[in-house]
C-alpha cells in the first residue's frame, strides 16, 4: 500500500465539516477582548496571542497530518510550503502564497489573500501597537516545530536486563513575524517565517523518571 | 465580503460592505480556537464556577455582536420586541447562523413560569470534550449560555442563562440544556402580554 | 489457549473468533517518548511494571526503525545506527509478526506513534491505525480540557477506541 499523495487544501476543505466564519471571527474577537482586559499592556497581549497560537499549532498539526496525507516533513522549504498552502486553505478556507525565499531556503514570506480573523475589526487608538492576528504567527511556529523538530535519538545500552535510554533531542525553531498588516495600514497580510539554528539539547530519560 | 484573491483596504471598517455571512471556516479551526480559549481561561481561575463565568463573559460579547449583525441582515434593522419572538429568534435564526442548524428544542420550564430551555443533543462546543471527574459539573456550554444571554440582554430581555448536561436514556452522551431564566420584570411582562401565544412553544 | 499454554514452540494461538476481541493492547506515544495511552484487552502475561513495559516498547520501535533503515537495500543515503531519523525519511517499517502476535506500527511526521498488538493472523492494519489517529485528533487534540503531553483520560476517546478495536478482524 504505497502512501497516497498529499491532498489539496481545496479538496480537504470541501470534505471537512465547516462552520460559519462569523462564529469563528466573533469568538476570536471575544478572546482578544478578554486578553486586553486581563493583561492591559498591548505588548503582553501580543505575546499571549502568539503563545496561544503556538499552543494551537502543536495540536492542529495532527489534524493537518491526518487529513492531508502528508507523511513526511523532512526539509524546511517543502514543509513550510505545504503547511502554508494546504494548511490555510483546509482550516480557514483561504489561499496563502509562499514567496520571497532567500538563497539558502531558510526564510520566506507567507501572504494571505484574505483573513477571516479581522472581519468587523477596527483597531481603536488605544490598541495601536496590537498585532491583532498574532495568533496566526504562533500557529505557524508551533506547527512547523512539531514537524521539523528532530526526533530524539536513543542510545541503547543494555544494562542488566533493562534498557537504559539516553536521548538527544534537537529542536528546530522558527521565528514568525508580521511584515505587513492591513489593520495597521499596510496593503496586505504578510508573515515572514525564518528558520533559526537547530538547537541540540540533552534530554535525559532515566529509569527512575 | 472581501473580493476573491484580493485585499481591499478600507480606511474605516464602516466603509467595508457588511459580510453576508456566507463564508465558512473548518469546524476544526473553531474547535482549536475554542480549546485555547478554555485553556487560557483555566490559567486565570481557581475554580470551575469562575471558569464558567469567564467563558460566559466571552460568549456574551459574541452574542451581543451576533444580534447586531443579524438584525441588520435578516430583519432589516427591526429588532424583536416580543419575548416569544426573541426566544424563537435565538432558537432558530441565531442557532442556524452560528451552529448551522436550528436548536433541537425550545421548551417552557415546567416548574417556573419565567424559565425556558433550549436543548441540543450535541452542542458544538461539547462535541469533542470529555469532562474529567474532578471537574464535576463543568460545562463548556457556558460559552453558548453567554451567547444567548448576550443576544437576549442586547435585545432588552435580561436573563440569567446557564448550561447543564442532562442524561438521555439509551444514549452514552448527555444532551446540553441551556436554561434561560428571565429577570422578574421581563417575566411579568411576558405573562400579561403573551399568554395567548404560549402554546406556540 | 490452554492447549498451547506454556509451550514455547506453539505455532499460533487459536484463530480469532468472530465475536471476540483480537486485539491485545494499544500504545500511543508522543514525540518525547511519553506514553500517552496504554490500553490492554487481552494480555494474560505481564513481566514488567507498566513504566518498564512502555520504555521497552518505545526502545524496541526505535531500534527496529533504525535497523530496518540501515538494512534498506534500495536507499543510497543511510544514516548511522542510532542517528535520529525524521518520520518519512528513508524506509519505515509498519508491522512485524511473531508466532504469537502481530505488532502494527504507525508514526506521524509530528512524532505520534501508535502501536497495536493483535492476533498474528490479523490482516493489514495500516488503515485502522490511521483511523485511530483520526480518533486521537478529534477526541484528544480537540478536547478543550486536554493538555498536550499529558496522559489521555478522555472517556470519549477510550470508549470509541474500545468499540472500534473490537470491530477489527
Image (cartoon, rainbow, N blue to C red):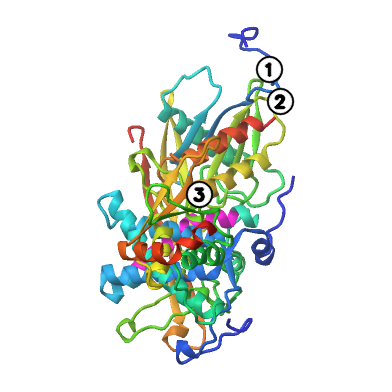
Measured from the top left, where is residue C1 in percent x and y?
Answer: 62, 12
Magenta residues span A48-65
Residue where numbered disc 2 is placed: C121
Measured from the top left, where is residue A120 in percent x and y?
Answer: 46, 80
The vertical placement of C166 against B34, above or below, is above
**Chain on which label 1 sits:** C
> For the residues tagged 2 and 3, is the chain the same?
no
Measured from the top left, where is residue C169 in percent x and y?
Answer: 70, 29
Query: Front-most of C25 and C135?
Result: C135
Residue A59 included in the magenta stretch of the image? yes
Query: Front-most of A104 and C104?
Result: C104
**Chain on which label 2 sits:** C
The vertical placement of B151 against C157, above or below, is below
Name of the residue lying farthest toward the top: C3
Report the disc number at residue B128.
Answer: 3
- Left of C128 or right of it: where is A149? left
Residue where numbered disc 1 is placed: C12
The vertical placement of A74 against C12, above or below, is below
Determine the main secondary structure of the stretch shown in magenta: helix
- Residue A37 figure quarter: bottom left
Q: Residue at x 47, y 49 (%)?
A: B176
Query: Could you say whether the residue bearing mark 1 is in a helix, strand or loop?
Result: loop
Residue A138 seen from this side? no
- Left of C152 or right of it: where is C137? right
> How many angstroms separate mark 2 from mark 3 (CA)?
34 Å
Residue A75 seen from this side? yes
Residue B187 included in the magenta stretch of the image? no
Amino acid at each position: 500500500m504505497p502512501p497516497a499523495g498529499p491532498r489539496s487544501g481545496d479538496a480537504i476543505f470541501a470534505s471537512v465539516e465547516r462552520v460559519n466564519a462569523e462564529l469563528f471571527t466573533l469568538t476570536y474577537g471575544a478572546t482578544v477582548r478578554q486578553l486586553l482586559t486581563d493583561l492591559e499592556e498591548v505588548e503582553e497581549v501580543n505575546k499571549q496571542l502568539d503563545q496561544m497560537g503556538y499552543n494551537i499549532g502543536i495540536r492542529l498539526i495532527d489534524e493537518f497530518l491526518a487529513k492531508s496525507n502528508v507523511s513526511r516533513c523532512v526539509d524546511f522549504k517543502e514543509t513550510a510550503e505545504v503547511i502554508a498552502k494546504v494548511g490555510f486553505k483546509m482550516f480557514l478556507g483561504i489561499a496563502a502564497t509562499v514567496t520571497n525565499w532567500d538563497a539558502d531556503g531558510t526564510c520566506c514570506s507567507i501572504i494571505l489573500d484574505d483573513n477571516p480573523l479581522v472581519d468587523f475589526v477596527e483597531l481603536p487608538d488605544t490598541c495601536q501597537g496590537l498585532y491583532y492576528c498574532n495568533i496566526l504567527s504562533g500557529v505557524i511556529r508551533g506547527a512547523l516545530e512539531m514537524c521539523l523538530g528532530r526526533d530524539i535519538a536513543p542510545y541503547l545500552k543494555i544494562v542488566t536486563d533493562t534498557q537504559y535510554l539516553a536521548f538527544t533531542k534537537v529542536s528546530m525553531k522558527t521565528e514568525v513575524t508580521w511584515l505587513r498588516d492591513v489593520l495597521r495600514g499596510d496593503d496586505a497580510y504578510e508573515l515572514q517565517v525564518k528558520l533559526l539554528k537547530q538547537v541540540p539539547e540533552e534530554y535525559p530519560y532515566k529509569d527512575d523518571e | 465580503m472581501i473580493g476573491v484573491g484580493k485585499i481591499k483596504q478600507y480606511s474605516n471598517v464602516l466603509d467595508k460592505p457588511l459580510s453576508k455571512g456566507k463564508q465558512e471556516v473548518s469546524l476544526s479551526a473553531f474547535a482549536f480556537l475554542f480549546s485555547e480559549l478554555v485553556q487560557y481561561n483555566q490559567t486565570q481561575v481557581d475554580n470551575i464556577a469562575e471558569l464558567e463565568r469567564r467563558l460566559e463573559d466571552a460568549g456574551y460579547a459574541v452574542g451581543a455582536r451576533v444580534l447586531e449583525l443579524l438584525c441588520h441582515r435578516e430583519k432589516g434593522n427591526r429588532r424583536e420586541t416580543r419575548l416569544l419572538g426573541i426566544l424563537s429568534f435565538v432558537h432558530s435564526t441565531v442557532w442556524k447562523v452560528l451552529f448551522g442548524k436550528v436548536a433541537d428544542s425550545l421548551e417552557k420550564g415546567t416548574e417556573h413560569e419565567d424559565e425556558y430551555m433550549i436543548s441540543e443533543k450535541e452542542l458544538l462546543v461539547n462535541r469533542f470534550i470529555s469532562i474529567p471527574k474532578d471537574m464535576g459539573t463543568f460545562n463548556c456550554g457556558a460559552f453558548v449560555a453567554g451567547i444567548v444571554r448576550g443576544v437576549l440582554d442586547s435585545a432588552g430581555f435580561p436573563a440569567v442563562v446557564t448550561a447543564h448536561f442532562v442524561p438521555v436514556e439509551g444514549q452514552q452522551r448527555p444532551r446540553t440544556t441551556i436554561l434561560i431564566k428571565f429577570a422578574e420584570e421581563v417575566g411579568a411582562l411576558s405573562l400579561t402580554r403573551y399568554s395567548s401565544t404560549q402554546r406556540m412553544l | 489457549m490452554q492447549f498451547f499454554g506454556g509451550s514455547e514452540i506453539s505455532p499460533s494461538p487459536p484463530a480469532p473468533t468472530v465475536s471476540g476481541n483480537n486485539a491485545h493492547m494499544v500504545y500511543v506515544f508522543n514525540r518525547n517518548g511519553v506514553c500517552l495511552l496504554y490500553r490492554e484487552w487481552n494480555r494474560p502475561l505481564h513481566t514488567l511494571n507498566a513504566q518498564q513495559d512502555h520504555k521497552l516498547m518505545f526502545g524496541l520501535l526505535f531500534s527496529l526503525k533504525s535497523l530496518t533503515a540501515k538494512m534498506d537495500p534500495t536507499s543510497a543515503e543511510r544514516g548511522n545506527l542510532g542517528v535520529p531519523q525524521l518520520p518519512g525519511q528513508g524506509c519505515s517499517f509498519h508491522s512485524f509478526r511473531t508466532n504469537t502476535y502481530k505488532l502494527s506500527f504507525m508514526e506521524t511526521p509530528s512524532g505520534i506513534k501508535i502501536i497495536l498488538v493483535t492476533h498474528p493472523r490479523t490482516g493489514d492494519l495500516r488503515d485502522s491505525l490511521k483511523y485511530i489517529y483520526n480518533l486521537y485528533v478529534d477526541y484528544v487534540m480537540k478536547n478543550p480540557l486536554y493538555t498536550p503531553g499529558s496522559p489521555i483520560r478522555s472517556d470519549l476517546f477510550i470508549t470509541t477506541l474500545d468499540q472500534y478495536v473490537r470491530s477489527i478482524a
